[in-house]
Amino acid sequence: MAFIFEKLDVYRKAVNFADKICELTKDFAKGNYYLADQLNRAALSISTNIAEGNGRYHKADRINFFRIARGSAFECVPILEIYSRKGLINADKGTMLKSELEDICKMLSGLISY
């Protein structure tokens, strides 16, 4: 039996995004650990807050967790920019990941408005 939130496209996209980030950062040099750790935490926070929000009974609680998830998605953007500037990822990869975040944020805004 699946949890209801597992059927949400935004949840699946968020999990896929976090998985891509884990794969991207797994071989980063130790000198960049702080960036990898922060990005991994923020990326994971998107899907975990969607899940936690769906476990809440009150609409206001759910919306609060969806807002936190959206904030975590926004948090990923400057870190990806720093990755690009440091040459840890190429510009195309950064643009692709930021585009995925934009889609996730739009979907979260829809959940918040719903």
Image: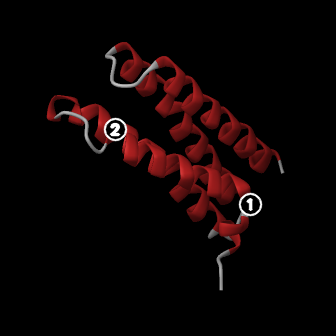
Residue at the (56%, 45%) spot, across then down? 68
Q: Position of 39 compared to 15: left or right?
A: left
Distance CA(mark 1)–CA(mark 2): 29 Å
Is residue 94 visible in the rendered image? The answer is yes
Left or right, 1 with reference to 71: right
Q: Is residue 109 above or below residue 91?
A: below
Q: Residue at (58%, 29%) from the top-left corner?
A: 96
Where is residue 23? Give x, y as percent: 38, 47
Determine which residue is flagged by label 2: 38
Residue at the image point whose x is 25% and y is 41% from the top: 27
- The answer to whether 90 is drawn above or below residue 20 in the figure is above
Q: Residue furthest right?
A: 114
Q: Is residue 41 visible?
A: no
Res. 43 mark: none
What residue occupies the far bottom of the structure in this picture? 1
The part of the image, by quadrant, that contains residue 25 is top left
Residue name at image x 16 percent, y 29 percent:
31
Q: Look at the image and tell me in which quarter the N terminus lies.
A: bottom right
Tell me, yes or no, whether the two marked residues, 1 and 2, touch with CB atoms within 8 Å.
no
Q: Amino acid at mark 2?
A: Gln
Most extreme residue toward the left is 30
Label 1: few (<14), some (14–19) or many (≥20) C-alpha neighbours in 10 Å: few
Q: Secondary structure at mark 2?
A: helix
Label 1 or label 2, whichever comes before in sequence order: 2
Q: Position of residue 114 (x, y in %)?
A: 84, 51
Q: Which residue is mark 1?
A: 59
Q: Position of residue 113 (x, y in %)?
A: 81, 45
**Depth check, front residue: 61 or 2:** 2
Which quarter of the picture shows residue 33? Answer: top left
Q: Nearer the viewer, residue 43 or 70?
A: 43
Q: Nearer the viewer, residue 90 or 100?
A: 90
Towards the viewer: 25 or 92: 92
